[in-house]
Amino acid sequence: MIAIMKKSMARMEKSEMKVSREQMAENRRRILEAASRLFREKGFEAVGVAEIMKALGLTHGGFYGHFSSKDDLIVQALAHAVGERNGATLSLPAYLEEYLSPRHRDNRAGGCPISGLAADTLRQAPEARAAVTDGVRVQLDWMSEKFPEATEADRRRRAIGSWSAMVGATILARVMVDPVLSEEILTETLAWINDGPGQQAPALSEPQ
Amino acid sequence: MIAIMKKSMARMEKSEMKVSREQMAENRRRILEAASRLFREKGFEAVGVAEIMKALGLTHGGFYGHFSSKDDLIVQALAHAVGERNGATLSLPAYLEEYLSPRHRDNRAGGCPISGLAADTLRQAPEARAAVTDGVRVQLDWMSEKFPEATEADRRRRAIGSWSAMVGATILARVMVDPVLSEEILTETLAWINDGPGQQAPALSEPQ
DNA sequence: AGCTAAAGATGATCGCCATCATGAAAAAGT
DNA sequence: ACTTTTTCATGATGGCGATCATCTTTAGCT
Protein backbone atom coordinates (compact mmCIF):
# COMPACT_ATOMS: atom_id res chain seq x y z
CA MET A 1 0.00 0.00 0.00
CA ILE A 2 2.61 2.45 1.02
CA ALA A 3 4.89 1.21 -1.71
CA ILE A 4 2.21 1.75 -4.27
CA MET A 5 1.62 5.25 -3.06
CA LYS A 6 5.28 6.02 -3.24
CA LYS A 7 5.47 4.72 -6.75
CA SER A 8 2.58 6.81 -7.95
CA MET A 9 3.96 9.81 -6.16
CA ALA A 10 7.25 9.34 -7.88
CA ARG A 11 5.57 9.12 -11.20
CA MET A 12 3.49 12.18 -10.57
CA GLU A 13 6.54 14.25 -10.08
CA LYS A 14 7.75 14.03 -13.59
CA SER A 15 4.51 13.69 -15.52
CA GLU A 16 2.12 16.60 -15.67
CA MET A 17 0.16 16.35 -12.42
CA LYS A 18 -2.98 14.49 -13.40
CA VAL A 19 -5.57 16.71 -14.91
CA SER A 20 -8.80 15.07 -13.85
CA ARG A 21 -7.93 14.52 -10.21
CA GLU A 22 -7.25 18.15 -9.85
CA GLN A 23 -10.31 19.01 -11.84
CA MET A 24 -12.30 16.85 -9.50
CA ALA A 25 -10.90 18.48 -6.37
CA GLU A 26 -11.43 21.84 -7.94
CA ASN A 27 -14.99 20.92 -8.85
CA ARG A 28 -15.66 19.75 -5.33
CA ARG A 29 -14.40 23.04 -4.02
CA ARG A 30 -16.57 24.94 -6.46
CA ILE A 31 -19.61 22.92 -5.42
CA LEU A 32 -18.94 23.81 -1.80
CA GLU A 33 -18.50 27.43 -2.73
CA ALA A 34 -21.69 27.63 -4.80
CA ALA A 35 -23.67 25.64 -2.26
CA SER A 36 -22.49 27.82 0.55
CA ARG A 37 -23.55 30.96 -1.26
CA LEU A 38 -26.88 29.57 -2.37
CA PHE A 39 -27.66 28.22 1.08
CA ARG A 40 -26.95 31.59 2.65
CA GLU A 41 -29.13 33.26 0.07
CA LYS A 42 -32.12 30.93 0.06
CA GLY A 43 -31.78 28.51 2.94
CA PHE A 44 -30.99 24.81 2.87
CA GLU A 45 -34.43 23.59 1.89
CA ALA A 46 -35.02 26.00 -0.93
CA VAL A 47 -31.89 25.03 -2.82
CA GLY A 48 -31.88 21.81 -4.81
CA VAL A 49 -28.93 19.69 -5.76
CA ALA A 50 -29.63 20.35 -9.41
CA GLU A 51 -29.57 24.10 -8.89
CA ILE A 52 -26.19 23.95 -7.22
CA MET A 53 -24.68 21.85 -9.98
CA LYS A 54 -26.20 24.04 -12.64
CA ALA A 55 -24.48 27.02 -11.04
CA LEU A 56 -21.19 25.41 -12.12
CA GLY A 57 -22.41 24.36 -15.53
CA LEU A 58 -22.67 20.73 -14.41
CA THR A 59 -25.66 18.44 -14.19
CA HIS A 60 -27.18 16.84 -11.12
CA GLY A 61 -25.88 13.38 -11.87
CA GLY A 62 -22.30 13.95 -10.87
CA PHE A 63 -23.22 15.25 -7.48
CA TYR A 64 -23.17 11.93 -5.68
CA GLY A 65 -19.66 11.31 -6.78
CA HIS A 66 -18.62 14.14 -4.51
CA PHE A 67 -21.03 13.88 -1.60
CA SER A 68 -22.99 11.02 -0.15
CA SER A 69 -26.14 13.05 0.29
CA LYS A 70 -27.47 16.57 0.43
CA ASP A 71 -27.15 16.45 4.21
CA ASP A 72 -23.51 15.58 3.77
CA LEU A 73 -23.09 18.57 1.47
CA ILE A 74 -24.75 20.81 4.02
CA VAL A 75 -22.26 19.77 6.67
CA GLN A 76 -19.28 20.20 4.36
CA ALA A 77 -20.48 23.51 2.98
CA LEU A 78 -21.05 24.87 6.47
CA ALA A 79 -17.63 23.76 7.63
CA HIS A 80 -16.10 25.28 4.51
CA ALA A 81 -17.86 28.61 4.87
CA VAL A 82 -17.31 28.88 8.60
CA GLY A 83 -13.68 27.93 8.26
CA GLU A 84 -12.88 30.84 6.02
CA ARG A 85 -12.70 33.39 8.86
CA ASN A 86 -13.33 36.28 6.58
CA GLY A 87 -12.85 39.12 9.03
CA ALA A 88 -9.76 38.00 10.84
CA THR A 89 -7.54 40.36 8.93
CA LEU A 90 -9.37 43.49 9.99
CA SER A 91 -8.98 45.36 13.23
CA LEU A 92 -11.84 44.80 15.60
CA PRO A 93 -13.38 48.26 15.19
CA ALA A 94 -13.24 47.98 11.42
CA TYR A 95 -14.71 44.50 11.60
CA LEU A 96 -17.59 45.64 13.77
CA GLU A 97 -18.36 48.49 11.45
CA GLU A 98 -18.27 46.30 8.39
CA TYR A 99 -20.37 43.61 10.03
CA LEU A 100 -23.07 46.04 11.08
CA SER A 101 -23.18 47.86 7.76
CA PRO A 102 -25.99 47.92 5.19
CA ARG A 103 -23.46 46.43 2.82
CA HIS A 104 -23.15 43.28 4.89
CA ARG A 105 -26.87 43.21 5.61
CA ASP A 106 -27.60 43.22 1.89
CA ASN A 107 -24.91 40.68 1.05
CA ARG A 108 -26.51 37.50 2.30
CA ALA A 109 -24.86 35.18 -0.20
CA GLY A 110 -21.38 36.45 0.56
CA GLY A 111 -21.82 37.48 4.16
CA CYS A 112 -21.11 35.84 7.48
CA PRO A 113 -22.40 32.27 7.38
CA ILE A 114 -23.20 32.30 11.06
CA SER A 115 -25.68 35.13 11.03
CA GLY A 116 -26.90 33.86 7.69
CA LEU A 117 -27.35 30.21 8.52
CA ALA A 118 -27.30 29.65 12.29
CA ALA A 119 -31.07 29.64 12.58
CA ASP A 120 -31.47 27.25 9.67
CA THR A 121 -28.80 24.97 11.06
CA LEU A 122 -30.93 24.47 14.16
CA ARG A 123 -32.90 21.79 12.39
CA GLN A 124 -29.95 20.15 10.71
CA ALA A 125 -27.84 17.18 11.69
CA PRO A 126 -25.63 17.48 14.78
CA GLU A 127 -22.55 17.54 12.54
CA ALA A 128 -23.89 20.67 10.88
CA ARG A 129 -24.58 22.26 14.24
CA ALA A 130 -21.09 21.25 15.33
CA ALA A 131 -19.58 23.15 12.41
CA VAL A 132 -21.42 26.28 13.51
CA THR A 133 -20.44 25.65 17.11
CA ASP A 134 -16.79 25.56 16.13
CA GLY A 135 -17.18 28.75 14.17
CA VAL A 136 -18.73 30.51 17.14
CA ARG A 137 -15.96 29.29 19.41
CA VAL A 138 -13.28 30.61 17.11
CA GLN A 139 -15.11 33.88 16.69
CA LEU A 140 -15.50 34.40 20.43
CA ASP A 141 -11.87 33.56 21.10
CA TRP A 142 -10.77 36.03 18.46
CA MET A 143 -13.01 38.81 19.71
CA SER A 144 -12.08 38.13 23.32
CA GLU A 145 -8.47 38.83 22.53
CA LYS A 146 -9.23 42.15 20.96
CA PHE A 147 -11.34 43.93 23.52
CA PRO A 148 -9.48 46.24 25.85
CA GLU A 149 -10.89 45.14 29.20
CA ALA A 150 -8.33 44.22 31.82
CA THR A 151 -9.49 40.76 32.82
CA GLU A 152 -10.07 37.80 30.57
CA ALA A 153 -13.53 37.32 32.05
CA ASP A 154 -14.54 40.88 31.20
CA ARG A 155 -13.20 40.61 27.69
CA ARG A 156 -15.01 37.36 27.11
CA ARG A 157 -18.25 38.71 28.48
CA ARG A 158 -18.05 41.69 26.18
CA ALA A 159 -17.20 39.43 23.25
CA ILE A 160 -20.19 37.20 23.90
CA GLY A 161 -22.59 40.08 24.41
CA SER A 162 -21.29 41.91 21.37
CA TRP A 163 -21.27 38.88 19.12
CA SER A 164 -24.82 37.97 20.11
CA ALA A 165 -25.89 41.50 19.31
CA MET A 166 -24.11 41.43 15.95
CA VAL A 167 -25.82 38.22 14.94
CA GLY A 168 -29.21 39.34 16.22
CA ALA A 169 -28.98 42.79 14.68
CA THR A 170 -27.98 41.38 11.30
CA ILE A 171 -30.90 38.99 11.28
CA LEU A 172 -33.35 41.62 12.44
CA ALA A 173 -32.07 44.28 10.06
CA ARG A 174 -32.43 41.83 7.19
CA VAL A 175 -36.02 40.97 7.92
CA MET A 176 -37.30 44.50 8.52
CA VAL A 177 -39.44 45.87 5.72
CA ASP A 178 -38.89 49.42 6.94
CA PRO A 179 -35.44 50.57 5.77
CA VAL A 180 -35.28 53.29 8.41
CA LEU A 181 -35.82 50.84 11.24
CA SER A 182 -33.42 48.42 9.60
CA GLU A 183 -30.62 50.97 9.52
CA GLU A 184 -31.42 52.17 13.00
CA ILE A 185 -30.95 48.66 14.30
CA LEU A 186 -27.54 48.46 12.67
CA THR A 187 -26.21 51.83 13.74
CA GLU A 188 -27.59 51.76 17.27
CA THR A 189 -26.33 48.24 17.86
CA LEU A 190 -22.89 49.31 16.69
CA ALA A 191 -22.96 52.28 19.03
CA TRP A 192 -24.21 50.11 21.89
CA ILE A 193 -21.39 47.64 21.35
CA ASN A 194 -18.75 50.32 21.13
CA ASP A 195 -19.90 52.37 24.08
CA GLY A 196 -21.16 49.58 26.28
CA PRO A 197 -24.63 49.05 27.61
CA GLY A 198 -24.26 51.72 30.27
CA GLN A 199 -21.93 54.06 28.35
CA GLN A 200 -19.05 53.20 30.64
CA ALA A 201 -17.37 50.50 28.65
CA PRO A 202 -13.98 51.51 27.33
CA ALA A 203 -14.66 52.86 23.88
CA LEU A 204 -13.03 51.18 20.95
CA SER A 205 -11.00 53.37 18.71
CA GLU A 206 -9.36 52.59 15.45
CA PRO A 207 -5.66 51.98 15.96
CA GLN A 208 -3.63 54.58 14.10
CA MET B 1 -79.17 12.57 21.09
CA ILE B 2 -80.17 14.39 17.94
CA ALA B 3 -83.34 15.57 19.60
CA ILE B 4 -81.36 17.05 22.42
CA MET B 5 -79.05 18.84 20.04
CA LYS B 6 -81.93 20.28 18.09
CA LYS B 7 -83.59 21.57 21.21
CA SER B 8 -80.46 23.30 22.37
CA MET B 9 -80.00 24.68 18.87
CA ALA B 10 -83.46 26.08 18.89
CA ARG B 11 -82.80 27.84 22.11
CA MET B 12 -79.75 29.66 20.87
CA GLU B 13 -81.37 30.72 17.64
CA LYS B 14 -81.68 34.34 18.51
CA SER B 15 -78.83 34.91 20.91
CA GLU B 16 -76.02 32.54 20.09
CA MET B 17 -75.73 32.96 16.35
CA LYS B 18 -74.95 29.66 14.66
CA VAL B 19 -72.90 27.08 16.40
CA SER B 20 -70.93 25.95 13.39
CA ARG B 21 -69.84 29.43 12.53
CA GLU B 22 -68.30 29.65 15.95
CA GLN B 23 -66.79 26.22 15.55
CA MET B 24 -65.31 27.39 12.32
CA ALA B 25 -63.84 30.52 13.87
CA GLU B 26 -62.55 28.44 16.73
CA ASN B 27 -61.03 25.96 14.31
CA ARG B 28 -59.39 28.75 12.41
CA ARG B 29 -57.88 30.01 15.63
CA ARG B 30 -56.69 26.54 16.51
CA ILE B 31 -55.09 26.16 13.09
CA LEU B 32 -53.21 29.40 13.62
CA GLU B 33 -52.15 28.27 17.05
CA ALA B 34 -50.94 24.85 15.91
CA ALA B 35 -49.28 26.28 12.81
CA SER B 36 -47.50 28.90 14.85
CA ARG B 37 -46.11 26.31 17.22
CA LEU B 38 -45.12 23.88 14.49
CA PHE B 39 -43.49 26.60 12.43
CA ARG B 40 -41.43 27.73 15.40
CA GLU B 41 -40.43 24.16 16.07
CA LYS B 42 -39.57 23.00 12.55
CA GLY B 43 -39.56 25.99 10.26
CA PHE B 44 -42.03 26.93 7.55
CA GLU B 45 -40.81 24.53 4.91
CA ALA B 46 -40.64 21.47 7.07
CA VAL B 47 -44.26 21.66 8.19
CA GLY B 48 -46.94 20.49 5.78
CA VAL B 49 -50.53 21.58 5.65
CA ALA B 50 -51.61 18.04 6.43
CA GLU B 51 -49.46 17.92 9.55
CA ILE B 52 -51.00 21.09 10.88
CA MET B 53 -54.54 19.88 10.31
CA LYS B 54 -53.75 16.50 11.81
CA ALA B 55 -52.57 18.27 14.95
CA LEU B 56 -56.19 19.34 15.45
CA GLY B 57 -57.68 15.98 14.48
CA LEU B 58 -58.75 17.34 11.10
CA THR B 59 -57.74 16.35 7.60
CA HIS B 60 -55.94 18.38 4.99
CA GLY B 61 -59.00 18.96 2.84
CA GLY B 62 -60.65 21.54 5.01
CA PHE B 63 -57.61 23.76 5.08
CA TYR B 64 -58.42 25.81 2.00
CA GLY B 65 -61.74 26.79 3.47
CA HIS B 66 -59.80 28.79 6.03
CA PHE B 67 -56.78 30.06 4.13
CA SER B 68 -56.15 30.73 0.49
CA SER B 69 -52.70 29.15 0.53
CA LYS B 70 -49.91 28.05 2.80
CA ASP B 71 -48.25 31.41 2.30
CA ASP B 72 -51.41 33.06 3.49
CA LEU B 73 -51.36 30.85 6.57
CA ILE B 74 -47.74 31.78 7.23
CA VAL B 75 -48.60 35.46 7.23
CA GLN B 76 -51.63 34.99 9.48
CA ALA B 77 -49.81 32.67 11.86
CA LEU B 78 -46.91 35.09 12.19
CA ALA B 79 -49.20 38.03 12.86
CA HIS B 80 -51.09 35.93 15.39
CA ALA B 81 -47.99 34.77 17.23
CA VAL B 82 -46.28 38.14 17.18
CA GLY B 83 -49.41 39.89 18.32
CA GLU B 84 -49.62 37.94 21.51
CA ARG B 85 -46.92 39.97 23.31
CA ASN B 86 -46.17 37.25 25.78
CA GLY B 87 -43.74 39.04 28.04
CA ALA B 88 -45.47 42.36 28.44
CA THR B 89 -46.79 41.47 31.85
CA LEU B 90 -43.38 40.90 33.39
CA SER B 91 -41.00 43.51 34.69
CA LEU B 92 -38.08 44.12 32.37
CA PRO B 93 -35.48 42.38 34.56
CA ALA B 94 -37.70 39.34 34.94
CA TYR B 95 -38.39 39.34 31.22
CA LEU B 96 -34.69 39.48 30.36
CA GLU B 97 -33.91 36.66 32.71
CA GLU B 98 -36.72 34.50 31.38
CA TYR B 99 -35.81 35.27 27.77
CA LEU B 100 -32.16 34.34 28.26
CA SER B 101 -32.90 31.17 30.21
CA PRO B 102 -32.31 27.54 29.18
CA ARG B 103 -36.05 27.14 29.62
CA HIS B 104 -36.80 29.58 26.82
CA ARG B 105 -33.93 28.27 24.73
CA ASP B 106 -35.39 24.78 24.93
CA ASN B 107 -38.94 25.90 24.31
CA ARG B 108 -38.86 26.67 20.63
CA ALA B 109 -42.47 25.82 19.93
CA GLY B 110 -43.79 28.02 22.71
CA GLY B 111 -41.08 30.65 22.79
CA CYS B 112 -40.68 34.07 21.27
CA PRO B 113 -41.70 33.93 17.60
CA ILE B 114 -39.21 36.62 16.65
CA SER B 115 -36.08 34.81 17.76
CA GLY B 116 -37.67 31.58 16.54
CA LEU B 117 -38.80 32.68 13.11
CA ALA B 118 -37.15 35.95 12.12
CA ALA B 119 -34.43 34.26 10.10
CA ASP B 120 -36.92 32.01 8.32
CA THR B 121 -39.17 34.95 7.58
CA LEU B 122 -36.37 36.53 5.58
CA ARG B 123 -37.34 34.47 2.59
CA GLN B 124 -41.06 34.85 2.98
CA ALA B 125 -43.52 37.27 1.43
CA PRO B 126 -43.26 40.96 2.39
CA GLU B 127 -46.50 40.65 4.37
CA ALA B 128 -44.83 38.04 6.56
CA ARG B 129 -41.79 40.26 7.03
CA ALA B 130 -44.12 43.13 7.83
CA ALA B 131 -45.68 41.13 10.66
CA VAL B 132 -42.24 40.59 12.16
CA THR B 133 -41.34 44.23 11.60
CA ASP B 134 -44.38 45.30 13.58
CA GLY B 135 -43.49 42.90 16.35
CA VAL B 136 -39.98 44.29 16.58
CA ARG B 137 -41.29 47.84 16.66
CA VAL B 138 -43.64 47.07 19.52
CA GLN B 139 -40.91 45.21 21.36
CA LEU B 140 -38.42 48.06 21.04
CA ASP B 141 -40.97 50.64 22.13
CA TRP B 142 -41.82 48.56 25.17
CA MET B 143 -38.20 47.98 26.14
CA SER B 144 -37.26 51.60 25.53
CA GLU B 145 -39.79 52.69 28.13
CA LYS B 146 -38.38 50.39 30.74
CA PHE B 147 -34.68 51.14 30.76
CA PRO B 148 -33.49 53.66 33.32
CA GLU B 149 -31.36 55.92 31.16
CA ALA B 150 -32.17 59.61 31.33
CA THR B 151 -32.66 60.43 27.67
CA GLU B 152 -34.99 58.78 25.23
CA ALA B 153 -32.13 58.31 22.80
CA ASP B 154 -30.04 56.45 25.37
CA ARG B 155 -32.96 54.24 26.37
CA ARG B 156 -33.71 53.40 22.79
CA ARG B 157 -30.08 52.64 22.02
CA ARG B 158 -29.91 50.32 24.98
CA ALA B 159 -33.21 48.70 23.97
CA ILE B 160 -32.00 48.07 20.42
CA GLY B 161 -28.64 46.71 21.52
CA SER B 162 -30.15 44.54 24.19
CA TRP B 163 -32.90 43.19 21.98
CA SER B 164 -30.43 42.38 19.21
CA ALA B 165 -28.29 40.57 21.74
CA MET B 166 -31.28 38.67 23.11
CA VAL B 167 -32.34 37.47 19.68
CA GLY B 168 -28.79 36.60 18.66
CA ALA B 169 -27.96 34.84 21.90
CA THR B 170 -31.13 32.77 21.75
CA ILE B 171 -30.41 31.66 18.21
CA LEU B 172 -26.78 30.92 18.97
CA ALA B 173 -27.53 29.11 22.23
CA ARG B 174 -30.04 26.94 20.41
CA VAL B 175 -27.66 25.86 17.71
CA MET B 176 -24.65 25.10 19.91
CA VAL B 177 -23.97 21.41 20.37
CA ASP B 178 -21.87 22.11 23.45
CA PRO B 179 -24.22 22.71 26.39
CA VAL B 180 -21.56 24.52 28.36
CA LEU B 181 -20.97 27.04 25.60
CA SER B 182 -24.70 27.33 25.07
CA GLU B 183 -25.33 28.26 28.69
CA GLU B 184 -22.34 30.55 28.75
CA ILE B 185 -23.79 32.51 25.84
CA LEU B 186 -27.07 32.94 27.69
CA THR B 187 -25.67 33.92 31.07
CA GLU B 188 -22.90 36.18 29.78
CA THR B 189 -25.24 37.95 27.41
CA LEU B 190 -27.65 38.54 30.26
CA ALA B 191 -24.84 39.85 32.42
CA TRP B 192 -23.54 42.06 29.64
CA ILE B 193 -26.99 43.53 29.04
CA ASN B 194 -27.56 44.15 32.73
CA ASP B 195 -24.19 45.19 34.01
CA GLY B 196 -21.95 45.93 31.14
CA PRO B 197 -18.27 45.18 31.35
CA GLY B 198 -17.34 46.73 34.67
CA GLN B 199 -20.59 46.57 36.60
CA GLN B 200 -20.80 50.32 36.29
CA ALA B 201 -23.83 50.56 34.12
CA PRO B 202 -27.07 51.36 35.86
CA ALA B 203 -27.94 47.89 37.01
CA LEU B 204 -31.45 46.68 36.58
CA SER B 205 -32.93 45.45 39.79
CA GLU B 206 -36.18 43.71 40.34
CA PRO B 207 -38.76 46.15 41.66
CA GLN B 208 -40.02 45.11 45.07
C1' DA C 1 -89.79 19.80 7.74
C1' DG C 2 -87.34 20.86 3.78
C1' DC C 3 -83.99 23.63 1.20
C1' DT C 4 -79.48 25.76 0.62
C1' DA C 5 -74.89 26.70 1.55
C1' DA C 6 -70.82 25.77 3.67
C1' DA C 7 -67.30 22.83 6.55
C1' DG C 8 -64.76 19.16 6.42
C1' DA C 9 -63.41 14.39 4.42
C1' DT C 10 -61.60 11.66 0.63
C1' DG C 11 -59.10 11.04 -3.00
C1' DA C 12 -56.84 12.66 -7.13
C1' DT C 13 -53.35 15.62 -9.64
C1' DC C 14 -49.17 17.79 -10.46
C1' DG C 15 -44.78 19.29 -9.81
C1' DC C 16 -40.55 19.23 -7.46
C1' DC C 17 -36.63 16.98 -5.70
C1' DA C 18 -33.36 13.58 -3.68
C1' DT C 19 -31.42 9.55 -5.00
C1' DC C 20 -30.05 5.80 -7.94
C1' DA C 21 -28.95 3.02 -12.41
C1' DT C 22 -26.69 3.09 -16.35
C1' DG C 23 -23.66 4.68 -19.96
C1' DA C 24 -19.91 7.28 -22.25
C1' DA C 25 -15.57 9.32 -22.21
C1' DA C 26 -11.39 10.32 -20.58
C1' DA C 27 -7.60 9.67 -17.24
C1' DA C 28 -4.56 6.58 -14.28
C1' DG C 29 -1.99 2.68 -13.98
C1' DT C 30 0.36 -1.37 -16.09
C1' DA D 1 -1.41 0.46 -26.21
C1' DC D 2 -4.64 -1.83 -22.99
C1' DT D 3 -7.18 -2.23 -18.93
C1' DT D 4 -9.30 -0.32 -15.13
C1' DT D 5 -11.16 3.54 -12.74
C1' DT D 6 -13.37 7.40 -12.21
C1' DT D 7 -16.08 11.57 -13.51
C1' DC D 8 -19.91 13.36 -15.20
C1' DA D 9 -24.34 13.06 -18.15
C1' DT D 10 -28.86 11.11 -19.06
C1' DG D 11 -32.75 9.29 -17.64
C1' DA D 12 -35.55 6.80 -14.36
C1' DT D 13 -37.88 6.11 -9.71
C1' DG D 14 -40.28 7.20 -5.72
C1' DG D 15 -41.88 10.02 -2.26
C1' DC D 16 -43.68 14.04 -0.49
C1' DG D 17 -46.52 18.03 -0.37
C1' DA D 18 -49.54 21.87 -2.11
C1' DT D 19 -53.65 22.43 -4.33
C1' DC D 20 -58.04 21.19 -6.26
C1' DA D 21 -62.52 18.41 -7.34
C1' DT D 22 -65.98 16.08 -5.42
C1' DC D 23 -68.83 14.15 -1.91
C1' DT D 24 -71.16 13.98 2.64
C1' DT D 25 -73.03 15.94 6.35
C1' DT D 26 -75.12 19.31 8.92
C1' DA D 27 -75.90 24.18 10.31
C1' DG D 28 -78.88 28.02 9.24
C1' DC D 29 -82.77 29.70 7.26
C1' DT D 30 -87.72 29.81 5.62
Image: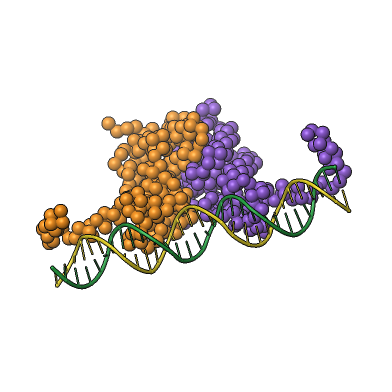
Chain colours: A purple, B orange, C green, D yellow
User: In the picture, residue B147 is in which quadrant?
Assistant: top left
Closer-to-camera residue (B205/C3): C3
Which residue is pictured at 59% across the width and 47% down the height? A69
At 47% from the left and 37% from the top, the residue drawn is B173
Q: Is residue B44 visible?
A: yes
In this picture, is A165 found above or below A178? above
Q: Going by the image, does A52 lie left or right of B190?
A: right
Residue under the point 60% across and 49% down: A36
In the drawing, does residue B28 fall left or right of residue D2?
left
Front-lying residue, B71 or C2: C2
- Residue sitting at x 44%, y 43%: B167
Could you tell me which quadrant the N terminus of chain A lies in? top right
Q: Is residue A15 left or right of residue B172?
A: right
Number of callouts in the render?
Answer: 0
x then y, percent, for residue B125? 44, 59
Q: Position of residue C10 (x, y in %)?
A: 35, 58
Q: Quadrant of the C terminus of chain A?
A: top right
Task: Note whether B101 is above or below B59 in the view shown.
Answer: above
| Quadrant hosting residue A178 | bottom left
Q: Is residue C28 above or below residue B130?
A: above
Q: Nearer the viewer, residue B139 or B122?
A: B122
Residue B50, position as x, y percentages in the image: 39, 54
Residue C19: percent from left, percent from top:
58, 50
Residue B197 visible from this viewpoint: no
